[in-house]
Image: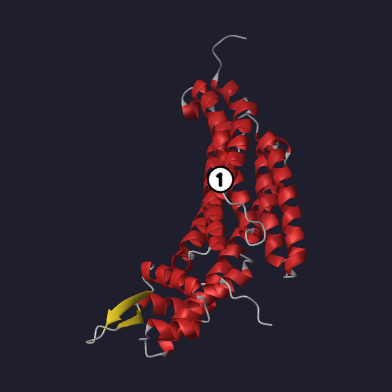
Amino acid sequence: MSKKRDRLEVIYDFLKIIQDNHNSIKPTPLLRKTNLSSQSFLEYYKELLSGGFIRDIYNKQNKKFITLTDKGFKYLGKYKTIIGFIGEFEL
Amino acid sequence: MGIHTSNKQVMNMPMPYFINTPNLGIELAYTIVILIFCFLVYFKTREIYNLTKHKGMQFFRYAFIFFGLAYASRLFLYLMIFGSDNMFGFSMIRRTMMPVSNLVVAFFSTMAILYLAYSTIWKNINIEHFLTFSNIIALFVAVMAFVSRSTLTVSLIQLVLMVFAAIIIFINHKKDKKKFGTKALYLLIFALWIFSLFALESRRIMSFEFKIGFQIISLFVFIAIYYKVAKLVK
């Protein structure tokens, strides 16, 4: 049985899915791929949006897509460092 | 003996502790180095904290800020205890400032101990209003320091806090089954701080070599922590 993902891991998965989809994904497939409940998804989505990790963009048909910001890419780049730091200092 | 003393007599008078030893220079260098490394730990972790807003990281960073402030205010207290009256103008000012410095040292150091201990156990023990809780304890210790006017009282209260923190850390460590290295380093930081405070009042009976040895160990621990941080957060 896989253990429950912690907050940082969920954020990493969330952002990684967007990156792996050419940095542009619709909310519904993102919800499905993150394996989160609708409620949790919405909470993380709002947190990442307000934190400046992701932003919404609209295409010509006015369809909403979610994309990473520079901060989002930075989080992905630093994730291993962050996990290493937390593990080393047992935080 | 008359009021007027000859130059020869003045030269033969025992010099105050503060002046006849290089203690001030050593204390100053010791405090500055620890202060620098505490602030370096704080600033080095700023980026990864801003990215995550991780609670444990927040407590860890604040602990080092508080340790830096505790060591800085300890230097001020040291000057109050060992400085000559000439240095501060009036002994009256010194008498007023000493309990205040005691209070500040006690507050910052208690906050540092509580924050560092809580940074390792917050996942298992959730204290909802930790900021309020830690402030109440730190204020209590600070008031005790102010009333007693003794660093010995503070070091004894903090020793009890340290033992309590060590027990909780140890119980949680058994649950976590992780290595004990970093937690042991934290306990060493607590012990070194408490000893540095205790040493202020018993300095006159402590040998110079012992004091230097102890200060080198303290510096080594703070530098080791910074080195560990710097290695991880490039």
Q: Position of residue B158 (x, y in %)?
A: 68, 43
Left or right relative to B105: residue B212: right
- Residue ID at (71%, 66%): B181
Q: Nearer the viewer, residue B60 or B65?
A: B60
- Residue ID at (44%, 76%): A75
With respect to residue B228, does A63 lie above or below? Answer: below
Q: Residue furthest left?
A: A60
Q: Quadrant of the N terminus of chain B?
A: top right
Q: Position of residue B203 (x, y in %)?
A: 68, 38
Residue kind at label 1, given as amino acid type = Ala
- Residue ID at (53%, 72%): A8
With respect to residue A32, does A50 lie above or below? Answer: above
Would you identify the image quadrant in which residue B70 lies?
top right
- Residue ID at (76%, 53%): B167
With respect to residue A26, does B49 lie above or below? Answer: above
Residue picked out by circle 1: B70
Mark 1 belongs to which subunit?
A: B
Q: Position of residue B199 (x, y in %)?
A: 68, 41
With respect to residue B180, does B112 lie above or below? Answer: above
